[in-house]
Image (tube, rainbow, N blue to C red):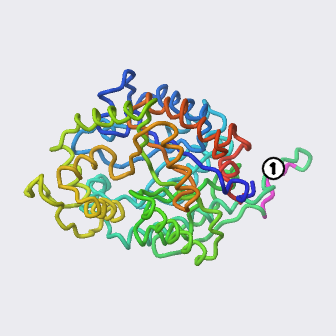
């Protein structure tokens, strides 16, 4: 698909959280699903596919939450789960989060190629480097490598996986019973990679997949994350609290993509957003208020402390948010939240509630028309190419989004009525490889 034909329409992902993205969401649903219930996850994927979402996006972490949150304490491994989802859906893209810090390129290339085969061309890899010391301790380490080291490893990791995927050329499999030849051997190539972090011979032991390689998603917005995205990403998942902030990120990221020798139109930028959908504004506002009244501020403060890498319990809750040094963790999200606190003059209590509720992603409270107005403005004003939708309550808010918001977007010509292609890459308007 030519990217120009998708340029003026939104791409939408469903950021999957089986119990809802808001920390209080599970307490308000009438149909509470379990994060490890594959039938429930398949149903959510089918709901998203019925709404013609481009992506079913699955986050992950390699450690449990010390605060015993239902959203992060227990969940299925994404690639395993998406293999089951793949055979129960037909067109929606399937994005799995996987860390380059605690895996190896050969295994990663093989598993994502397998998912692309199983889904017939719908696989995507959300590349992360991990940031929590709790994760490191699950892999025989006392602490994480520093930020620069993690991104240097990720860069070489992606170089190796791309070489492995490219090792099988088109036409490498040509079974000929008469000659007894199954493969065309000179179309299957070892990679013989020797680098700072990896030594990999290849070739991959799986044939070229329908997309050639999975769609590559980057979720880091730090300087290192943006640089890696400029070099390798096809979708960028980010967080932005305002249109001005989003425009600045969008312009910077697209400029870096061009400087890296790539076409900026071949990379889709999709901020996360939590829409609180109501049939009326009053209904939406009442729901948002109810969600936030159920937030445990102590829990929110602990989450914020974990995110910031410092103990916030000694600071006054109704005082200003303290200065937070950018450490070796998730730098982009820390900066986003501290900038928001300064811009909106938030107290520590208010920021803790936001951190617990939306984890720093933008919230839109209103009707389908309000949400469509917002999406259209961001698309037309260069703030986003689409959005990763984070329903606060599952399945109710997903159902309302599909029932009310998507038809309004279609009425405005911003979102297609059906999938035009078989592969995720084509449906996103990305070039084939």
Residue appearing at x 62%, y 37% in the figure? 52
Q: Classify 188 as above or below 419.
A: below
Residue 104 place in picture, x, y as percent: 48, 59
Magenta highlight on residue 102? no
The image position of residue 178, as x and y in percent, is 92, 46
Q: Is residue 116 above or below residue 418?
A: below
The residue where tag 1 is placed is 182
Q: Residue at 60% across / 30% down in the picture? A: 88
Residue 182 place in picture, x, y as percent: 81, 50
Magenta span covers which residues?
180-186
Secondary structure of the residue carrying numbered label 1: strand
Quarter that holds the N terminus: bottom right
Residue at position x 78%, y 60% in the image: 185
Nearest the eye: 213 or 376: 376
| Label 1 Cα crowd, 10 Å radius (few <14 / some 14-19 / many 20+) | few
Q: Residue furthest bottom?
A: 259
Extreme residue toward the right, this view: 178
Coordinates of residue 268 in the picture (x, y in percent): 58, 58
* Rendered residue at 65%/47% (across/down): 424
The reply, left or right, for residue 205 in relation to residue 138 is right
In the rendered structure, does residue 185 fall within the stretch colored magenta? yes
Image quadrant where residue 21 sits:
top left
């Amino acid at each position: 698909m030519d990217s120009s034909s998708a340029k003026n329409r939104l791409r939408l992902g469903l950021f999957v959280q089986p119990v809802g993205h808001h920390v209080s969401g599970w307490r308000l649903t009438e149909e509470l699903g379990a994060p490890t219930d594959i039938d429930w996850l398949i149903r959510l994927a089918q709901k998203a596919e019925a709404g013609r979402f481009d992506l079913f996006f699955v986050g992950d972490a390699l450690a449990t939450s010390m605060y015993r949150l239902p959203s992060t304490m227990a969940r299925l491994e994404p690639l395993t789960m998406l293999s089951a989802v793949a055979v129960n859906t037909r067109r929606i893209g399937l994005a799995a989060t996987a860390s380059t810090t605690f895996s190896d390129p050969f295994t990663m290339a093989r598993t994502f190629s397998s998912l692309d085969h199983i889904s017939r061309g719908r696989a995507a890899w959300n590349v992360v480097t991990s940031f929590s010391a709790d994760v490191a301790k699950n892999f025989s380490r006392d602490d994480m490598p520093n930020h620069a080291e993690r991104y240097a490893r990720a860069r070489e990791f992606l170089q190796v996986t791309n070489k492995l995927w490219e090792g099988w050329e088109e036409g490498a499999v040509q079974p000929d019973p008469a000659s007894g030849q199954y493969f065309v051997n000179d179309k299957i190539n070892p990679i013989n990679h020797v680098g700072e972090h990896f030594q990999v011979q290849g070739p991959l032991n799986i044939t070229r997949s329908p997309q050639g390689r999975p769609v590559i998603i980057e979720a880091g917005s730090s300087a290192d994350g943006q640089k890696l995205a400029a070099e390798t990403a096809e979708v960028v998942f980010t967080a932005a609290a305002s249109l001005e902030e989003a425009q600045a990120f969008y312009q910077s990221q697209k400029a870096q993509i061009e400087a890296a020798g790539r076409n900026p139109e071949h990379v889709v930028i999709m901020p996360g957003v939590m829409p609180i959908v109501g049939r009326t504004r009053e209904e939406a506002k009442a729901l948002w208020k109810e969600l936030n009244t159920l937030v445990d501020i102590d829990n929110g403060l602990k989450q914020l402390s974990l995110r910031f890498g410092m103990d916030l319990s000694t600071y006054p809750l109704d005082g200003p948010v303290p200065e937070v040094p950018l450490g070796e963790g998730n730098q982009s999200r820390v900066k986003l939240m501290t900038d928001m606190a300064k811009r909106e003059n938030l107290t520590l209590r208010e920021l803790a509630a936001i951190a617990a509720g939306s984890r720093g992603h933008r919230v839109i409270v209103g009707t389908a028309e309000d949400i469509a107005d917002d999406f259209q403005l961001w698309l037309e004003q260069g703030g986003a190419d689409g959005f990763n939708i984070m329903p606060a309550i599952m399945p109710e808010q997903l159902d309302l989004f599909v029932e009310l918001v998507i038809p309004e977007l279609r009425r405005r010509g911003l979102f297609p009525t059906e999938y035009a292609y078989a592969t995720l890459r084509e449906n996103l308007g990305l070039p084939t490889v």
